[in-house]
Image (cartoon, rainbow, N blue to C red):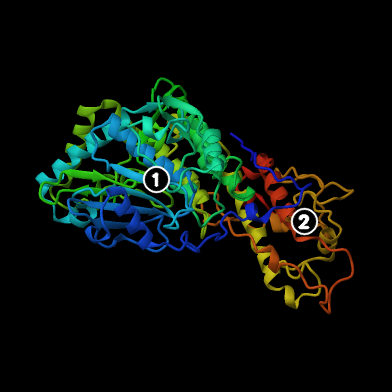
Amino acid sequence: MSGSSSASLDWTESVDWSTMVDWIDVRKDPWAGVNVDLNALHAIVCQFFRLSAAQCGPAVTLSEQPKSYARVYSFQLPTQSVVARLVAPVKPLFKTESEVAAMDYLRCHTGLPVPIVYVYCSQSSNPVGAEWLLMEHMPGVELGEVWDQFNYPQKQTLARNLVDFYDELFRLKADGCGGLYHSPNSVDDFDLSRTPRWLGAPLSAESLRLLRSLCGHSISSGHRLGPIHDLSLINFHLVMPTSSQTRPVFSTDEYVKLISNNGNPPTRNDWDLMVREKCLVLIQSIQKFYRHSPFFGSSAASDFRFSHGDLHDGNVLVDPQSGAITGIIDWDTAAFRPSWATVAGFGWFQEDAERFIIGTNSPNNFENDVQPEDPKLRAFFHTELYRTNPDLFSCFLGGVEFRAILAVAADDPLPASKSDIFFIKYHELGYWQESRRGEFPWDMYAWRLMLLNCHQLTAIFQERNRDKVAASNRLVSLGHETSSAELAMFRHKRLRSPLIPPTTSPMRPSHGCAIQGCSKSKDRFFITVIFAFASLSPVQPLFFTMSHIPDPSEMAVPESHPQADPQPQASDIDVLRSIVEMGRALLDLNTILRLHATEYHLSQL
């Protein structure tokens, strides 16, 4: 089956490099420029609990890792210890509001050990200098600190608790996918099920307007769906989508597209979109084989369950003696998501990487299960899942392929995207199983050649940029021997379609090559750039990336350059246009690209 890219560039408008280069390091530290006043925080704790300054101990750091999304402190009071969680200015207002609403919702609808939030402030314009929450100090230690010391009975207890945790979340349903928020119309004083906001910094009129605008879909009395905060959508290293670009969606396809595009409208560059759009194509193709499944087929398009969003052994607290879960913390990425995306396990219980290709890594096949009781514990965990909730068990085991593709959609393009490598390995290692599923959703060989040639021309473009100082014109060096006709085509912007240079004498096709307009003359030999790698085996892994685009500020040759060519020059955008147009054209030449590489005899062109 052939496929073509739907991503397009509108070259009639100027290119916005802030979105073309989505991997740009926008912020190295989310706390940059934030001045936290712990004395002000101490005063607020004393004020809220009606204590004197002497009755409240100083702030004790629990977590203050650099470049983290939160800083956590504890305060010792006469009868208890409270936790203050300071929130980095990533998705201001919405992330804090969603985290508080999620914990309130869970305490009302489940029996899970979730912290009580006493009071919070989602306005950074307060004396502390950042948004904050005052919460109950949960007992226990982080699971990661004691897992290796647990014996089998303790691990059994933990496994049983984990099953109950997933089961309670799985039973919370919604008809949309998004973060959870209190109704903007609810009044704190008359709704005792919700945490009060700090009166010292009430919601501004603009904040209230935003909440009402983006959190309008009701799922229960007092709760609304609003912007979602998947980890990939709050990556401060990237061009981060705004809250209006991560509104609730109401189908699985929309959710996968939202993650692939990193927002709606997209914030990824058009090159990256050409690869990531295949995530949705692949998931839609797989769904066809689950027509009657309530969780994996098209009928499950609007079935969403609640999930933590970032569960790991650092935010699961356990009793070091019994192994029982005593607390689940860090709910800032909690949301309703597709059912197959909600139950992946975590830590030792995370089996996706054992059974399926994740990113560029082949399955581990449980090779790290070296303890004698490991197989027994996995069998116990699976049995408990199935006994407690068969649907939960189905999503845990059957959702691995969907979750692997979603991970590709969310993959960081920094320093280099791995999406293309995943699809290549997925295809080559036979995960599609053509004998059972039929033809692959798109022509993989054509797609790989398209990516390879785009990558090669990008490398040529970067080489030209590096050598510009020594060059006599803006084209500098294309990284290969450049003919005068080739230079002329660049200068006069005639590279409308790099695959088919203009000519008046069409060449007779040979060896199945149906390219019209390819001349044997060296003046038309630009075609060699495109097919320079045609001798590669169609099964040879081509590991490369298209993510890196040169910084435009470094491309321009100074007007005072002593060897500047006075003739009209092709702009850098013209070259980029040529590269992208070449990729489009390649995708339309599936008849040619299906041929084995040895059928391309460039010497006869």
* Left or right relative to 367: residue 565: right
| Percent coordinates x, y for residue 213 in the rendering | 56, 34
| Percent coordinates x, y for residue 44 in the rendering | 35, 53
Q: Amino acid at mark 2?
A: Asp
Q: Which of 217 and 221 lies nearest the eye of the viewer?
A: 221
Measuring 38% from the left and 59% from the top, which residue is drawn there? 40
Q: Is residue 531 visible?
A: no
Judge depth for marks 2 and 1 and give the one in front. 1
Q: Which residue is mark 1?
A: 198
> In the figure, 316 relative to 466: above or below?
above
In the picture, the quarter occupied by the N terminus is top right
Q: Is residue 267 visible?
A: yes
Q: Which of 49 and 172 lies nearest the eye of the viewer?
A: 49
> In the figure, 434 relative to 585: above or below?
above
In the picture, the quarter occupied by the C terminus is bottom right
The circle drawn on residue 574 is: 2
> In the figure, 35 relative to 538: above or below?
below
Measuring 55% from the left and 49% from the top, which residue is drawn there? 538
Name the image quarter holding residue 453. bottom right
Measuring 38% from the left and 46% from the top, which residue is drawn there? 120
* Left or right relative to 202: residue 193: left
Real-space Cα distance between discs 2 and 1? 55 Å
| Percent coordinates x, y for residue 19 in the rendering | 63, 52
Q: Quick one: SS at disc 2? A: helix
Q: Amino acid at mark 1?
A: Trp
Q: Which of 554 and 25 lies nearest the eye of the viewer?
A: 25
Q: Quick one: SS at disc 1? A: loop
Q: Which numbered disc flags the more N-terminal residue, 2 or 1? A: 1
